[in-house]
Amino acid sequence: MDTSKQDSSILKEGFLVKRGHVVHNWKVRWFVLKADKLLYYRYEGGKRDNCHRGTIPLTGCEITCPYLEYDTRPLVLRLKTNTSEDHFLEACSREERDEWAAVIGAAVQKLPSGTKTVPAPSSRSSKSLQLHNVNLSQVVDSMYDVHSGIKLSSHVEQGCTYINCFSGSTVVDWLVFMHLALTRVEAVTLASALLDEGCLRAVGVRSVFAEHSAALGEQFLDDSTALYSFAESFKKRGSVKSEKSVCAVEMSGKVQRRGYLLKQGHKVKNWKVRLFVLRADPGFLHYYDPSKDDLSPAGVKGNVQGNLFKIITQTDKHYFIQAPTRQEKMEWIEAIKRHT
């Protein structure tokens, strides 16, 4: 699996999550970028298939990065071929997504009839254009209004109970209904600014994951399963109480490293690609199935021993992990060692 003997014609390769054309599910594939095409392969049994599963021609291809239409998948870029066929690819981080877009864009520019990359407006530029006259404090005051403000409720997510909170889609609905935003896109921009300024905070697994993702920054999710509450500094305005969840504590650490790795199953000894996220203060290593919209983390905490990429938890549970290259393996081991 080590790519140290890489073909000189390969410009970039690595894991991405691809949306299917007929059935719109998401599958992890190994992508190989060449001068005029992007090939993708299955990765099974800890190794790449010999035959590629598909080809995306790059001549005349347009790139949209970031592609912001997927609320629960903020790290997607879109490739539109010269036959108007769309391909949606998700990376493990903003840096990786932007690097893929840049390398693909450079390859497209070198081809005949190449077109320029079409960037979508970033959330930061949208804020500066749309929110310069918005008083965020007044918006929060309106959200607290007893009669017309946001209604607080309790939510149960993956065995954890969160009280006095609300979903991301509830906030977006309310902002549009109160004419504080004309569209849902504007409402998400406004809610993101409230999150960025510390007026709101993420409390659910999905929203905390998004907030602490180094790839996403402070993007607010228009999602019925993404949970938020008023920030501690604003709770003096009302009688809001908060219940701290073990899940929320686990997810509250600062993200140190993200990436796609292969993990061996405990019962069935097969290898599956997982998105690993290393957090510190508190220190946890979580992994996710990147093909699923419902991000269900499994906590892993332990020490790395020797040169093997093997993690042993405090309960003596062993995790066997593969990285695509030796360099990535050593970087992950060093990163984990610093936080165990």
Image (cartoon, rainbow, N blue to C red):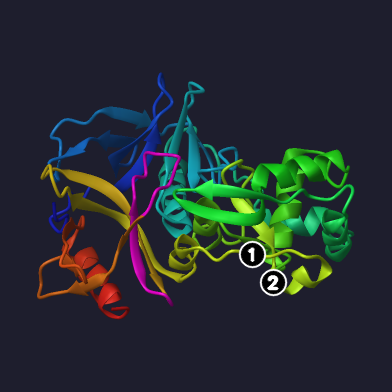
For the residues labelled 2 and 1, say whether their Cβ atoms are less than 8 Å apart: yes
Rendering coords of residue 309 (x, y %): 15, 65
SS at mark 2?
Answer: helix
Image quarter where the C terminus lies is bottom left
Region of the chain picked out in magenta, as a range? 281-297
Label 1 belongs to which residue?
242
Rendering coords of residue 163 (x, y %): 63, 56
Whether residue 99 is visible, yes or no, is: yes
Q: Residue type at mark 1?
A: Ser
Is 296 contained in the magenta span? yes
SS at mark 1?
Answer: loop
**154 or 190, nearer to the observer:** 154
- Left or right of 96? Residue 189 is right
Label 2 belongs to which residue?
232
Badge 1 crowding class, 10 Å Cα cut-off, few under 14, some 14 to 19, many 20 or more, is some
What's the residue at 60%, 51% (across, down)?
227
What's the residue at 34%, 45% (across, down)?
289
**134 or 208, nearer to the observer:** 208
Rendering coords of residue 184 (x, y %): 74, 39
What's the residue at 15%, 67% (across, down)?
316
